[in-house]
Image (spheres, grey):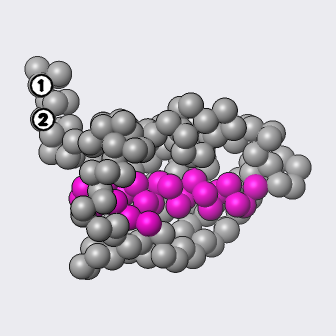
Amino acid sequence: MIKQPGSKMCFVCGGNNPIGLHAEFYVDGEEIFTEFVPREEHQGYPGIMHGGLQSTMLDETIGRAAFLKRLWMVTARMEVTYRVPVPIGQKIRVTGRIQEVRGRTMIATGQIVLGDGTVAVEARGLYVQIPEERRREVERLVFGREIPSLEYLLELEAQQEA
């Protein structure tokens, strides 16, 4: 499993964002995931995680799946289906997976899964690639460095395990 880098001030993954969610993301095969425990300040109705934050976490996780192909994408459209409430104080797993990349677009899906395995929320999104000439600049602005390819990270992980 490989940890994806986070940025400084992103609301979802920013380590320096004082009001952020501070989520950490990992690569597991062809899937991106994070595990998160919603707190009281994340609720809408009492005891239930706010739907907007659920959508936010799905958008970030699904969008990060593009990194598997070393693509930087922005959300064009996302459809979210809320199946069951997401309770406060219980660990959830948020996943994202690429379904299809065609030209400059990606269709990807994600889920929020409760601790008992129940799929609470599902999402499907259309993402559009930012121009390649902007990718390196964005990586430096967001992460303070260029992001290595997945192949490089896998090679590094194998070397560390040896």
Specify the amino acid type for callout 1. Gln
Q: Residue at x 60, y 46 (%)?
A: 11
Q: In front here: 136 or 116?
A: 136
Specify the amino acid type for callout 2. Glu
What's the mark number on residue 21? none
Q: In front here: 5 or 34?
A: 5
Q: Residue 35 location in percent, x, y?
A: 53, 40
Q: Secondary structure at mark 2?
A: helix
Mark 1 closeness class: few <14, some 14–19, many ≥20 residues within 10 Å: few
Q: Is the C-beta separation of discs 1 and 2 under 8 Å?
A: yes
Q: Is residue 57 magenta?
A: yes
Q: In front here: 125 or 146?
A: 146
Q: Is residue 67 magenta?
A: yes
Q: Residue at x 56, y 67 (%)?
A: 122
**How many tags in the picture?**
2
Q: Residue 108 location in percent, x, y?
A: 40, 69
Residue at the spot of label 1: 159
- Work out whether 17 lies above or below 73: above
- Work out whether 56 lies above or below 38: below
Residue 142 visible in rendering: yes
Q: Quadrant of residue 2?
A: top left
Mark 2 closeness class: few <14, some 14–19, many ≥20 residues within 10 Å: few
Residue at the spot of label 2: 155
Cα distance between the residues tagged 1 and 2: 6 Å
Q: Quadrant of residue 17?
A: top right
| Residue 134 left/right relative to 49 | left
Q: Residue at x 46, y 40 (%)?
A: 7
- Work out whether 38 lies above or below 71: above
Q: Which residues are magenta?
A: 50-74
